Amino acid sequence: MTATLPDTTAERPLRPEEAPADAVLAVEGLVTRFDTPEGEVQAVNDVSFAVGPGETVGLVGESGSGKSQVFMSVMGLLATNGRATGSVRYRGHEILGLPPQKLNRIRGSKMSMIFQDPMTSLNPYLRISRQMTEVLVRHKGMGETDALKRSIEMLDLVRIPEAARRIRMYPHEFSGGMRQRVMIAMALLCRPDLLIADEPTTALDVTVQAQILDLMRDLKREIGTAIVIITHDLGVIAGLSDRVMVMYGGRVVETGGVRDIFYDPQHPYTEGLLKSMPRLDAQRLGELPTIPGQPPNLQHLPKGCNFAPRCTYAFDRCLAEDPALAPFGTGRSKACHLEKL
């Protein structure tokens, strides 16, 4: 979808080593692996970042780039064949590897996650009222009456019409956009410090996508929650994010303020993603540009730069040496051997 970039100047991105004491989340050297019958899958490879209070970060990349697995690792929701190493600190406290009982005190209460398909996230056999009040009873110790009142207030906040009546309905009685609003309301019930939205608009039509993004922008302003948007669509985060992290092959390949990324991309993969976005103001005719080739096999990553086999700028060093994510300019970093794109 096409979105308008904010006019404000993006703030300098936070690096993990300089994350302030009040950083909501600081991730350092995160590595995630999955054991499969075909071999080990290298899903996340040495990812580091920090999210500040009230900040919105966009995490972008093709399907299979490792975006979702970063935050499944953070939330302790990996499949049984997965394992994560490194450091994940919430408000300065290490949470990676915490027992489920201790992690449950943070999940849902301090950090919440919205998944891309609300129909599989909501229990089809329970009324919305039951599913929402259970969150408050469990995490906040509220009584059923107070929990129901708070739940209705939250449905009003996410613009569910006739919330007091509709809260008694089942998930199948809501449209896709309304179900997504219910998921956002559930995620915000405990007013978490961090909201992680994994492809929150993928299954929705363009009009509803715009409504959901407007809603998240308003909620950020009203509640002050830090937000991470995980998506393959740069247009989704254009008008919402303060900064962007671009992932490829399980690694972060470029970071920067949202305006820097859109108007001056410095990694060939970022440039390819931007060129492949449909634009209403495009004058060119013919086929939409695409990135040639296929994403790398995470079981057998290529030697050197993961993007080199698809990169039109690649030279000998790219095929032999994997570039480190290094800072350049003001508040930006990239993993590329080119000095300037």
Image (cartoon, rainbow, N blue to C red):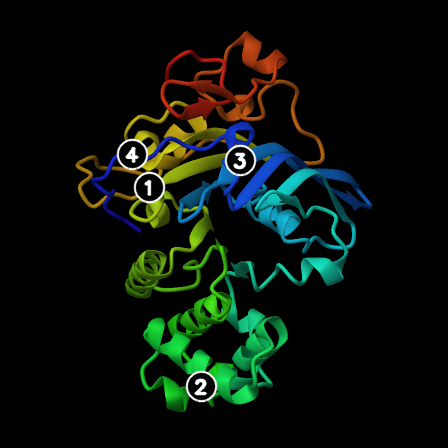
- Nearer-N-terminus badge (1/2): 2
Residue 290 position, x and y percent, is 40, 35
- Nearer-N-terminus badge (3/4): 3
Question: At x 25% / y 42%, what residue is drawn?
Answer: 5
Query: Mark 4 = which residue?
Result: 259
Is disc 2 in contact with disc 4, using a CB cutoff of under 8 Å? no
Looking at the rendered structure, the secondary structure element under dot 2 is loop
**Disc on res. 49:** 3
Along the viewing direction, whichever of 125 and 104 lies nearer the viewer: 104
Label 2 sits on what residue type?
A: Ile
**Disc on res. 246:** none
Where 130 sits versus 94, above or below? below
Residue 140 position, x and y percent, is 58, 73
> Could you tell me how far apart the alpha carbons at marks 4 and 1 are, in whole angstroms?
16 Å
Label 3 sits on what residue type?
A: Phe
Label 4 sits on what residue type?
A: Arg
> Could you tell me how far apart the alpha carbons at marks 1 and 2 are, in whole angstroms?
38 Å
Between circles 4 and 1, the one closer to the viewer is 4
Query: Mark 2 = which residue?
Result: 167
